[in-house]
Image: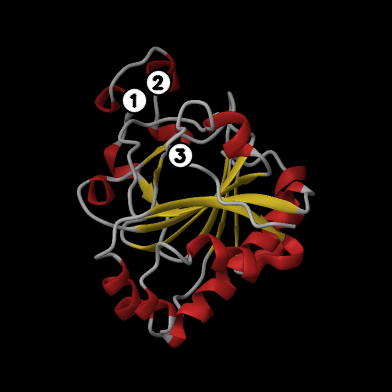
């Protein structure tokens, strides 16, 4: 399988022209993140909204303002974190060639079975907690997956399982030849902070009807 690995976020703009299932950009956490996120993970939340390239920081602040405790919003680290998320959002806008993307951030993750995303492309960053578990093709029985079999039959080689590290940017390709992945047990049984980015209007067009209790928060333009 093809995996694009890099230390430079800008190289991700090449992903659409490649046949890779996964792109990974290694990054180091910003100083102060461990203390900040240990406090934030005491709060349970899931927020979704739309982030425009021209107003990324303002949009993210708007989406988060009611769910992040005000004391943490006043923490100096908070603005650094929002700036980082805004930068990643801009890169994803460039990758998909759109002026805005759909943004989701939360502490709850619930995908225990190995699966392939039903979207062309998706970006994930785990800021705190265990990162997403993924399988190289050689470690997976894709026929077992297609037949609806449980994880123990999909996973051929447990030693080959891989995990996205904290703060690393991962882009997963979906569809029939997409990447098999799941929420790791540590995240299913604990708390984490995961940012997920999708193409513009993902929430309205796909999840709006089935998850009406999670409404996208859209800034007035």
Q: Residue at left 26%, top 56%? A: 191
The secondary structure type at the circle numbered 3 is: loop
**Distance (Cα) linking label 2 and label 3:** 14 Å
Number of the label disc, if any, that sits on residue 145: 2
The secondary structure type at the circle numbered 1 is: helix
Q: Are marks 2 and 1 in contact (CB under 8 Å)?
A: yes
Counting every numbered tag in the picture gives 3
The secondary structure type at the circle numbered 2 is: helix
To which quarter of the image does residue 73 belong?
A: bottom left
Crowding around mark 3 (Cα neighbors within 10 Å: few <14, some 14 to 19, many 20+) is some
Q: Which residue is mark 1?
A: 154
Q: Residue furthest left?
A: 189
In the displayed structure, 111 sits above or below 96; it is above
Number of the label disc, if any, that sits on residue 136: 3
**Distance (Cα) linking label 2 and label 1:** 6 Å
Q: Quadrant of the N terminus?
A: top right
Is residue 149 found left or right of 105 in the rendered image? left
Residue 192 visible? The answer is yes
Q: Are marks 1 and 3 in contact (CB under 8 Å)?
A: no
Q: Position of residue 214 (x, y in %)?
A: 45, 41
Of the two numbered discs 1 and 3 on the same chain, state the one appearing first in sequence: 3
Q: Residue at left 46%, top 78%? A: 78
């Amino acid at each position: 399988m093809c995996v694009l690995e890099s230390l430079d976020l800008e190289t991700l703009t090449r992903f659409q022209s490649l046949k890779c299932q996964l792109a990974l950009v290694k990054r180091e956490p910003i100083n102060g993140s461990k203390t900040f996120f240990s406090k934030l993970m005491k709060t349970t939340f899931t927020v979704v909204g739309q982030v425009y390239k021209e107003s990324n920081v303002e949009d993210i602040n708007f989406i988060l303002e009611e769910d992040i405790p005000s004391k943490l919003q006043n923490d100096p680290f908070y603005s650094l974190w929002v700036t980082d998320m805004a930068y990643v959002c801009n890169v994803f806008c460039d990758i998909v060639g759109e002026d805005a993307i759909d943004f989701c951030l939360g502490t709850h993750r619930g995908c225990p079975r190995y699966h392939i995303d039903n979207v062309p492309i998706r970006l994930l960053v785990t800021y705190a907690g265990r990162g997403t578990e993924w399988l190289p093709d050689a470690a997976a029985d894709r026929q077992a997956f297609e037949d609806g079999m449980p994880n123990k039959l999909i996973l051929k080689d447990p030693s080959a399982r891989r995990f996205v590290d904290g703060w690393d940017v991962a882009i997963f390709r979906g569809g029939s030849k997409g990447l098999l992945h799941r929420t790791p047990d540590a995240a299913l049984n604990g708390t984490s902070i995961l940012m997920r980015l999708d193409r513009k209007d993902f929430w309205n067009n796909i999840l709006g009807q089935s998850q009406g209790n999670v409404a996208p928060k859209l800034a007035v333009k």
